[in-house]
Image (cartoon, helix red, strand yellow):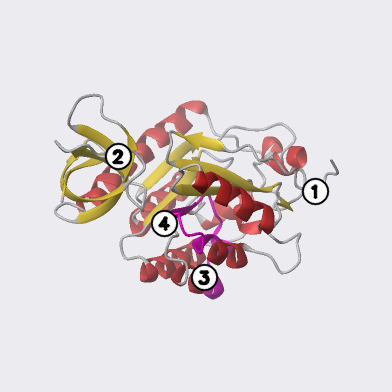
Amino acid sequence: MKVDEFEELTISTMNEHTRVYLKIQEGCNNYCSYCIIPYVRGNIRSRYQENILEETKRLVNQGFKEIVLTGIHLASYGKDLENISLNTLLPKLNNIELLKRIRLGSIEPVIITDDFISTLKNSPKVCEHFHLSLQSGSNSVLKRMNRKYTTNEYLACVNKLRKVYPDVAITTDIIVGFPGETEQEFEETLNFVKEVGFAKIHVFPFSAREGTVAFKMNEQIASTIKNERVNILSNLEKTLRINYLKNFIDKNLDVLIEKSPNNETNYIGYTTNYIKVKIYSSNNLVEGNIYNINITNIDKDILTGIIK
C-alpha cells in the first residue's frame, strides 16, 4: 500500500448489536506541537465514498441502526479526493432507508462552516452530538499548541450548532499542564469551559511525546501541578455534566436500546445526543429498537426514565 492511499478494509468496530464504527479517514496534516500522529501515520488519506456507502448498506442489512464515522482528522475527509467531503457523504448516508442514526467522531472547529450547517439541516439522521476538539481554553496556549483557531472562533462554531440543535451535546478534550501553562492561562480555560457549557469533557494531563515540538519546549509543568489541574477541571466537568442532564428531566427522548436487562425491568440505551439512559419497563423492549422515553431523574451521570 502506498502511503497516500487509504487502506480499504471492511472490518469495522462493533458495539453490541446496534452501533458500528466506520473509519473513513486516516492521517493528519496539521502538526499540532504535542502530537506524534502526522509523523507515524502520514498525511491524510480518505476512503472512497462509494465504498463507505456499500459497507454501510451491508451493515444496516445485518441489523445495525447507527454508524459512527471516525478518522484521525475527520474534518479532512475528502481533501485528497476530487469533489468529496462530509458535505457530499452525509446526505447519501442519510438516504439509506434502514439506517436510523449517523454519528460523527471527533471533529475540528474548521469544519463548522455555513455549508456544513446546511448539510446538517438536510441530513436529519445526523445525531445532535458533536465532539468538537478544543484542547485548551487559552488563546496563548492554543497558539503554542499550533491549533488553528481561537476561543472566539470556537465559540462561534458552538453557537452555529446550537442554532440547529437547541439540545445539542458539545463534548471535547482538554489538555492541562501544557508546557508554559501559567495559572492565568489555566484560569482562562476554566472560564471558557463554563462559557461553552460542555456536556462532557475528557481531561488529560500533558504527556510529552518524543519527536514532537512540545517535547523540546521549555517550562515543562511539574506532575503535581498537572494532577492538581486535572482534578480541578474534572470537578468542574462533573458540575457541567449534571447541569446539562437536568435539561432533560420531564422531557420525552428517543432512546436506542443497546443492552438487554440484567433483570426483568432495567434496560440501557442512548439518545441522539449520546446520553446514556436507564429505562424501567415491565414490557419486553427489543435491543436495536428506538423507543420514546419519559425522563424522570438523574442517577449519577446518566438519565433514568420510563417508556411512554
Specify start and end residues of the magenta stretch as a single range: 93-115
In the image, which is nearer the foreground, mark 3 or mark 2? 2
Asked which secondary structure carries label 2, the reply is: loop
Residue 110 x/y as whole percent? 58, 63
In the rendered structure, which disc, 4 or 2, sits on the residue that comes first in sequence? 4
Check contact, mark 4 vs mark 1: CB within 8 A. no
Quarter of the figure with residue 277: top left
Seen from this angle, which residue lies furthest front? 61
Residue located beneath label 1 in the image = 5
| Gap between marks 2 and 1 measured at Cα | 41 Å
Frontmost residue, 96 versus 135: 96
Q: Residue at x 40, y 56 (%)?
A: 192
Residue 191 x/y as whole percent? 37, 54
Give the residue type at disc 4.
Cys
Residue located beneath label 2 in the image = 286
Check contact, mark 3 vs mark 4: CB within 8 A. no
Q: Residue at x 67, y 58 (%)?
A: 49
Relative to 253, say whether 124 is above or below: below
Residue located beneath label 3 in the image = 119
Relative to 80, say whether 156 is above or below: below
In the image, which is nearer the foreground, mark 4 or mark 2? 2
Q: Which mark is residue 127?
A: 4
| Gap between marks 3 and 2 measured at Cα | 32 Å
